Amino acid sequence: MTTGAAPVRQLTPADAAHLRRTAEKILAGTGRDTSAAPRLLARVAESAAALPASVRRALRPADTDDGLFVLRGLDVDDAALGPTPAGWAAAGDSGAVHDVVLLLLATAMGNPIAWEGQQDGRFVHNILPAAGHEGEQTGAGSAVLLSPHTEDAFHPGRAHLLLLSCMRNPDRIATTAAGVRRVRLDAADIALLGRPLLPILPDDAYAEAQHFAGGPPPAVPTLFRAEDGLTLRFDPAYTPLADAAPDHRAAYRRLEAELARVSVAVRLVPGDVLVIDNDLVVHGRVPFQARYDGTDRWLKRASVRVPARRTRPLAEASEHGYGQAAIEAHAG
């Protein structure tokens, strides 16, 4: 893993102030409950459509093989933010104005989604360490490496884009990211990993999905060639590689090693929003020691689908998704 810098897009102070004022105005008219209020989402959609052209330019799709960029320049007042919550369930409306800013950005880029089975169906998730979950492969973990993965890889309705907004990161804990279009694999490995041979199982954030009895886990390809290049669907922590043939396991491990070789460490600072193309980039997090004293790392996360985007196999449409349903912020 390198410490190479991710591409950065800088918001002007005027644009950052406009986003915050817009979010504050929305909250003043709808209340501070940002969980899923239809009136708030409608106001977000109206306001996102009226964002300045300079903001919309900054939110254009990732335009390098990195498949990501950091949007920089938003303001986070650490004192006004309050302490890092003890877990997502304790977060409530903490940092509500930042939730709405993130929803504005997400809506300008596509359609935010929420999951019925995760964080009470909220459209903005709080990602922070939780006592007793240190060893988990989820956002609540801390003490172990969060393995590089595609977000919600088990589901055909997973996000096209992932937005990670930094509220607090005093220890400069790195988010790791690796783009599939940076790797070097031979044609035989790409062909083998393009065959649907193994499933990807639901992760520990989806307890209900892990007990789904509505059909066998569907086998899915790890790599797929879209019109504009290679894409991936990757989550080694929840892929039963022991069930694979030796040549498939070897090809998968070579991909894993290549992703590690091209991985970069992105150390977000408050006000940064890391935008990740979930079809091109796997992300993770280095281990850290949580203090649980109100000063720990705190990110907010939004997941976005891009309407009519064609970067995935058509066969995904027949998958059951382990019974999990995604809720669209702006349906229709």
Image (spheres, rainbow, N blue to C red):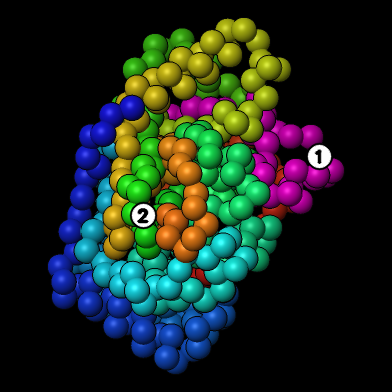
Nearer the observer, 306 or 142 = 142
Res. 215 mark: 1
Furthest toward the top, the residue is 246
**Residue drawn at (23%, 72%) of the image:** 16
The type of residue carrying mark 2 is Asn
Furthest toward the right, the residue is 213
The answer to whether residue 254 is above or below residue 305 is above
- The x and y percentages for residue 227 are 38, 35
Nearer the observer, 274 or 179 = 274
- The x and y percentages for residue 31 are 50, 88
Q: Quadrant of residue 77?
A: bottom left
- The x and y percentages for residue 135 are 61, 39
* Span highlighted in magenta in the image: 198-226
Res. 169 mark: 2
The answer to whether residue 7 is above or below residue 163 is above
Residue count near mark 2 (Cα–Cα under 10 Å), binned few <14, some 14–19, many ≥20: some
**Residue drawn at (25%, 42%) of the image:** 6
Q: Quadrant of residue 270?
A: bottom left
**Residue drawn at (60%, 68%) of the image:** 90
Mark sitting earlier along the chain (2/1): 2
- The residue mark sitting in front, 2 or 1, is 2
Q: Can I make out residue 112 in this image?
A: no
Q: Is residue 260 magenta?
A: no
In three-dimensional space, the C-alpha distance between marks 2 and 1, rounded to whole angstroms, equals: 42 Å
The answer to whether residue 183 is above or below residue 120 is above
The type of residue carrying mark 1 is Gly
Report the quarter where the N terminus lies. Answer: top left
Q: Is residue 215 magenta?
A: yes
- The x and y percentages for residue 113 are 53, 61
